[in-house]
Image: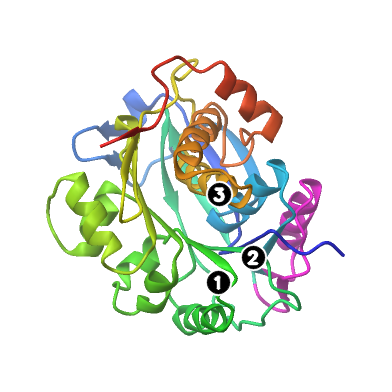
Amino acid sequence: MKPIDFLAIGDIVVDAFIKLKDPSIHCHLNHETKELCIPFGEKVPFDSVEIANGVGNGPNAAVSAARLGLKSAAMTDIGNDQYGADCLAALKKDGVVTKYVSKHRGKKTNYHYVLWYGDERTILVKHTDFGYKFSAPWKNPRWVYITSLSADSLDYQLDVAKWLEKNPDIKLAFQPGTFQINAGREKLTPLYKRSDVFFCNVEEARRILGIPSGEVKDLLKGMRELGPKTVVITDGPNGAYAYDGNEAWFMPTYPDPKPPFERTGAGDAFASTFSCALALGKTLAEALAWAPINSMNVVQHVGAQKGLLTRTELEKYLKNAPAEYKARKI
């Protein structure tokens, strides 16, 4: 059997996208404070519901890698229920290897509710306590991608870090989720230090470093001092930055063909595509050019995976990119 190129480790969920109806009357979006308000104690109409199976930061990355031509696997946990079966079927449909998916009798697969209005969303989350236990793959993958896991998975993540320390040939991409960032960088120091490439956005970098503000160049240097060989920081519509200790690069966003439809998964698409480009032998600058294209296409669809591109599709966008779409040193 061909060895795994890309092993994504992270929680899997079912996302139920609830499209809110007539929010100007029944809910209020304060764009300054990013608060979604609905009347308390009343019936709130919605327009539609769309279900996305087998999503979550880790599975999103695994699907991204599979579509870009890598042999990809997901290491995650599901319940012994229909939602878990639906998640497995979704992964298999995209060619993701599922032998590292652990099924737990008597447990419920993670199910999240996404309150969707315009191109933004608020997600109601609940993570099942699966009693995470790490079992190393029988054969080392070339790349491991670690991302969002629940708050009770610290020991599990440290066990992964110990395994990675014993296997220096494995490349590590680390894209921490909310609970991992909230845990504090000290608790996950082994993963920061072991990372070949690390991803976060500007706000997350400030939170990790414990500073209320700071220029991107300072954030890049500060994050790299925590141990990652290469740090990538995204800044939404302002573009993205990368720093490997020698050179710093800036990459603009890829032009949207039309306004974003729904933004879930844009960060996953960027980080996973960047990592896949490196796994496919691309340079840092080339990886920076690949990543925004998948992000651009993902936000044109509902959910984190519908818009993920194949390599042929991505390279077509790259070929047709405007002249100014290129990485430049800063």
Q: Which amino acid does label 1 sit on?
A: Thr
Which residue is under mark 1? 128
Q: Residue, x 13% and y 49% (percent of image)?
A: 214
Q: Residue, x 35% and y 77% (percent of image)?
A: 189
Q: What range is drawn magenta here?
A: 78-107
Q: Which of marks 3 and 1 is nearer the N terminus?
A: 1
Q: Work out how far the residue at label 2 is from the one at label 3, CA to CA, in angstroms.
A: 32 Å
Query: Residue 302: image x %, image y %?
Result: 57, 33
Q: Does the magenta stretch include residue 262?
A: no
- In this view of the protein, which residue sits in the foreground, 45 or 115? 115
Q: Is residue 106 magenta?
A: yes
Q: What residue type is labelled 3?
A: Leu
Q: Which amino acid does label 2 sit on?
A: Thr
Q: Which of marks 2 and 3 is nearer the N terminus?
A: 2
Dot 3: element: helix
Quadrant of residue 207 within the rendered picture: bottom left
72 in relation to 273, above or below:
below
Which residue is under mark 2? 109
Q: How dense is the environment of label 1, judged by Cα within 10 Å: few (below 14), some, or many (20 and up)?
A: some
Which residue is under mark 3? 278
Q: Residue, x 50% and y 15% (percent of image)?
A: 257
Q: Work out how far the residue at label 3 is from the one at label 1, CA to CA, in angstroms.
A: 33 Å
Q: How dense is the environment of label 3, judged by Cα within 10 Å: few (below 14), some, or many (20 and up)?
A: some
Dot 2: element: loop
154 in relation to 320, above or below:
below
Classify the position of the N terminus by image quarter: bottom right
